[in-house]
Structure formats: structure tokens, C-alpha cells
Amino acid sequence: MARQSESDSFMEMFGRFGRDLKVPNVDVEAILARHRKNLEALEKSARAGAAGTSSLLSRQREMLQDTLREIADMAQSYRASGNPQELMAKQTEFARKSFEAALKNAGEVAELARKSGAESIDILRARIKEAMEEVRAGYGEK
């Protein structure tokens, strides 16, 4: 027999408990619906965070590949030249380009991480706001 996920079995157990109590003026289905929305918001937030992490890792892999390609190109150019001044100029230029690329890449990685975190938090913030409005509307009905 296939086992349901923990959240589904808990939600169903809670629903049965509420219906079995037969407490007047308690809308068990509405309570379950609110909890489902919360769990859905958490799941959506987690998916957004995972997607952000995936794109961040993908971009970091691209950055590493670019760096390794530049190092290989630099190594090839070292063999072509025998002049020490030219070699020193190439090393200096490579160090400058590497430093600039590292700064640019670090900024890009930080921005990707910020966007991913902000998207995930915005999903939760929207659900909290919606839940608060539901609570206020519930008090207004009584």
C-alpha cells in the first residue's frame, strides 16, 4: 500500500478529528484550506529557492570553465614567447584581467543569491499578508 506524504496524512487526520468532534460553528474545511495554502506557499518558496540555487551553481560552473579556458590560453602564450619582459607583461595583464573578472563574478553571484532569496521571501511574505487578511475577515464575521 502506498503511503501518503506526512503533510497529507496529518491534514486528513486533523480533518477527521475536527469532523468527529462535531463542534458547532467550526468550519474544519476552511481551517484545512488555510493550512493547505500555507503549505503550498512553503513549497512554492522552497521551489523558488531551489531554482535560484540551481541557476547560481550553473553560473558558477560557467565562470569556472571560462577561468580554466583563460588559464589554458595564457599557458599557451607563455610557450610562444621567450622574452622575459614580454612574459612579465603577459603575467601582469593576466593578473589584472583575473582580478577584474573575480570582482565582476563575485558581484554577479551575490546578485543571483539576493534575487533568489528575495523571491523566496516574497512568496512567504505574500502568504503571511493573505493569512492576516483571512484572520481579520474571520473576526469581522462574528
Image: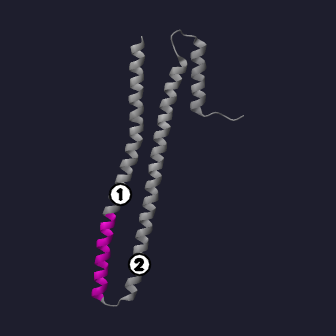
| CA separation in Å, label 1 and label 2 | 24 Å
| Three-letter residue code for mark 1 | Glu
Q: Looking at the rendering, which quadrant does residue 12 occupy?
A: top right
* Residue at 45% from the left image edge and 40% from the top image edge: 45
| Three-letter residue code for mark 2 | Asp
Q: Is residue 85 magenta?
A: yes
Q: Mark 1 points at which residue?
A: 108
Percent across and percent down for residue 35 are: 50, 27
* Pointer 1 local density, CA inside 10 Å: few below 14, some 14–19, many at least 20: some
Q: Mark 2 points at which residue?
A: 73
In the image, is 134 to the left or to the right of 12? left
Percent across and percent down for residue 28 are: 54, 18
Q: In which quarter of the image is the N terminus?
A: top right
* Residue at 38% from the left image edge and 29% from the top image edge: 129
Q: What element carries label 2?
A: helix
* Residue at 40% from the left image edge and 19% from the top image edge: 137
Q: What element carries label 1?
A: helix
Q: Is the magenta stretch mostly helix, strand or loop?
A: helix
Percent across and percent down for residue 47 are: 49, 43
Relative to 137, does residue 54 appear above or below in the rendering? below
What segment carries the magenta color? 84-102
* Pointer 2 local density, CA inside 10 Å: few below 14, some 14–19, many at least 20: few
Q: Which mark is residue 25?
A: none
Q: Quadrant of the C terminus?
A: top left
Percent across and percent down for residue 20 are: 61, 14
